[in-house]
Amino acid sequence: MRTELLRRFLTDRWSVVALAFLLAMLLSSLLNGSLTGFEATATSSDTLIGPSPVHWLGSDELGRDSASRLMFGARSSLLVAAGSALAAALVGVPLGVLAGYFGRAVDAIAMRIIDVILAVPTVLVALVFIAALGPSTTNMIIAIASASAPQFARLARAGTLEIRERDFVLAERAMGAGHLTIMVRVVLPNILAPLIVQFVVTAAGAIVVAAGLSFLGLGIPPPEPTWGGMLQQAKAYMYQSPWYGIFPGVVLTLTVIALDRIGASLRRAMGSTQDLGRASASAPGRGAT
Amino acid sequence: MQRIGDQIAEIITLHGGTRSEAQRRAVDLLDMVGVPQPATRARQFPHQFSGGMCQRAMIAMAMANRPQLLIADEPTTAVDVSVQAQLFDLLRTAKQDTGAAVLLITHDMGVVAENADRVCVMYAGRVVESGPVDDVFTQPAHPYTRALLNCVPRLDRDVDGALAAIPGGPPDPMAERRGCAFAPRCPQRQGRELCGSEIPVLLGMPTSPGKPQRTAACHFSTEPPVSMEPDEGAAPSRAGEVPPDDEPLLEVTQLVKRFAIRKGVLSRTVGEVHAVDDISFTIRRGETLGLVGESGCGKSTTSRLLLRLVEPTSGDIRIGSVEVATAGRRSLTAVRQRVQMVFQDPLASLNPRWSVGENAAEPLRLRGDVSRSERMARVHELFERVGLLPAHSGRLPHEFSGGQRQRVAIARALITDPELVLLDEPVSALDVSVQAQVLNLLADLKRERQLSYLFVSHDLSVVRHISDRVAVMYLGKIVEIGPKRTMFTAPRHPYTRALLASVPVPETGRARTGAPLQGEVPSPTDPPTGCRFRTRCPRAEDVCAEVEPPLNDVGGTAVACHFPVLEPWDQTIAGADRTGDTTMPSDANVMTTGGPRHAH
């Protein structure tokens, strides 16, 4: 089934392109400057020039190479994206599974807390966190993760509620399995598909939020290059060197589109394999009467 | 969401007529199909109707425009036998009143024998045989018809030894077909080329003058019939079994389960469902106890209570030396290893993300003291035993047919070498032909491994075939419990009798013994006082409403009735008032297929 999933995923050309784009981004971010010949923080006298054979995507007000900075900036963007999605999943999923599995009081309490967090926009929650903890990569991850965890919890809870009533969960209990075993080994793998999609969606959202926070000066402090930080600085030179601001914007947009594309494609691939299992499950047998 | 009355009226107005007129006629129709208080009921919604009542409303709808042909597609598949009997009585009167012809589509040979004039047997999309019901049942011409009639367990007699199961499964409808579709499973073929290369034509057969024509699609329909070989290794006879020893393996005493009905924000308990109410029974080593009853009688809850999958309200359950009801976590886990369960729907009870091998190995994995390679070795060994290819153990459950999946579930139940297996409707979701294979397997395994079974089922014929003793439940109570032989030859409780009388027997020219059940099961939230069956009982008197009858020994069986039936029960004597009534008098055609069409 796993190879089947991969095959379905790969039939979508655009998602393959998107995946290739993200991988290229990841790779280039690890090769600080060796691709462009400039280190991300190295200054020069060529300030605010447009794309040229030397500086492929131009340079900034300190003469630093934009291409190098963009590549290096991918590092923090992708780290924040993956880190916050992972942290959100690690907090949200266990909470949701517990709430769904045990129901009653556990469910009521967990879900009310989550409703409260969901009522506040992600950026606002993140702002409060950064304001309290100070700007850094870790704090940014904590901020975004705490705002995104409720979505994971809701999804995990909904999936668990559905799975919990199925006969194979009852069968597992009849074989002597404990609640923890059932939640980890039986429930979790069966609700994984929507969670993986949510992971990708959260990652895309995190990139945007991280850029937004950097743009407001609440992101990762300079001199480490970030896309949002570049956009913020470019704002001041919009008329002298429009290229300065355009490239970070384009890269940011492309990355989010790529993640979104992959998410959509995964959803379709997983949805159809689930249907495969369920098509025969829903076939009406002769009922017990 | 539309009111029942409106739904019927809509059909009438589609063919002309005013709204109010149609409404009035809708109420008349509901009255005709036996819906009580039709005027009130017409204003209700479908979810307020029970299954049987819904089906009555459907019949009312079908009769609304006085059709000339009524097509009934598995009309009673989802209802209890007692309701089934009522619905067919209704269908029969409806047919007489309107003079309509009926096309009845069913998988149940008993229903055919009891209701049809002519029968048409289908296999893999083709008619393989047709003719008058009497002829087809007494002298089936096609090997498939013969096999179909022989593979079902009988309510009216014991089948000695294994059931004559049809080997294999129905053909893949997508596959390209050459020759006779039944050839791979056919005993008549005897390796002949012709069956594999040429599709047999439906040919007329000699019939007595004045009778409808008979046809059969078999190259060798005129040959003397070759009977189906019983499964290889099948038991020569059930009679010579090891006698169950006297020590009870399972002892249930005064078991009670009430589900609270909660309402509102504060989850106040507003009522209770009396699911299982004060039942006691034992199962000895090597014994099969059949637990039967209509839907909602508490039989499935009982099986779940035994492993504390549902917490009992009160009562004792003893398995071996363990008090299950009060057991701590460790001893409960140990009990759950010694007692295994098989569920009705094998697809739902197998984890869809695990291969069938992993599914079957799961109880051993949970025990934690068997290495992975040993587990796989055990799985392969068991797969071979239950008739699965060990090489397929890496496949996922949805790649298998219903019968194969149930074999996986059985292998899983046996992997820890349990003493007791709880079988909750294990063959109800399977094709009749496959059902026989699984029943044979269960019987063989029981003998080989000295297993005890609790066999929960609504199908009385299946229970008769597999059980040593039988308990009949009604609204959470055991009304009669005793050895199989007396239960099916001399039932004492009026409910048992009525239940048995409701089951159609696949043989023509027979009438039912006694009258089937009338009415419906009362709500378990507010069960009748005294004897719970009294509201539907023909023998009920005042005392039944006041005093709850205890289980008393009456000639070998324990019966909970103030007035147990002592008259002999002879299934060969027709019920006097129903003799001429059992087959539909005018033209009713029947199509029979091997079972639910989606089961594969």
Image (spheres, coloured by chain):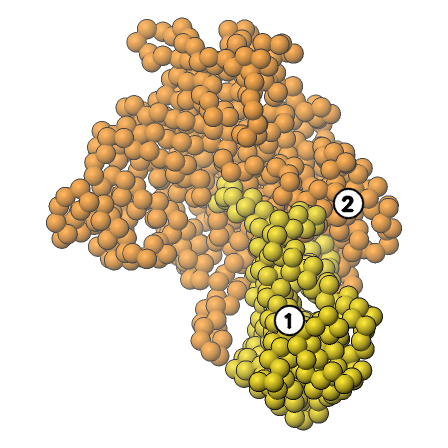
> Could you say which quadrant of the image residue B216 lies in?
top left
Tell if the residue under mark 1 belongs to the same chain as the one under mark 2: no
Mark 2, secondary structure of its residue? loop
Tag 2: amino acid: Ile
Tell me residue A30's x, y (percent): 80, 70
Q: Is residue B86 above or below residue A233?
A: above
Tell me residue B321's x, y (percent): 77, 56
Q: Chain of mark 2?
A: B
Q: Is residue A252 visible?
A: no
Residue identified by numbered label 2: B415
Chain letter, colour orange in render: B
Tag 1: amino acid: Val
Figure quadrant of the N terminus of chain B: bottom left
Q: Nearer the viewer, residue B327 or B111?
A: B111
Q: Chain of mark 1?
A: A
Chain letter, colour yellow in render: A
> Could you say which quadrant of the image residue B444 lies in?
top right
Q: Residue at x 65, y 51 (%)?
A: A10
Q: Is residue B86 above or below residue B216?
A: below
Q: CA distance from mark 1 to mark 2?
A: 57 Å
Mark 1, secondary structure of its residue? helix
> Could you say which quadrant of the image residue A256 lies in?
bottom right
Q: Is residue A52 visible?
A: yes
Q: Nearer the viewer, mark 1 or mark 2?
A: 1
Residue identified by numbered label 1: A251
Tell me residue A81's x, y (percent): 68, 73
Q: Residue at x 62, y 9 (%)?
A: B192
Figure quadrant of the C terminus of chain B: top right
Category of crowding for the residue at label 1, using alpha-carbon neighbours closer than 10 angstroms: few (below 14), some (14–19), many (at least 20): some
Q: Residue at x 79, y 38 (%)?
A: B380
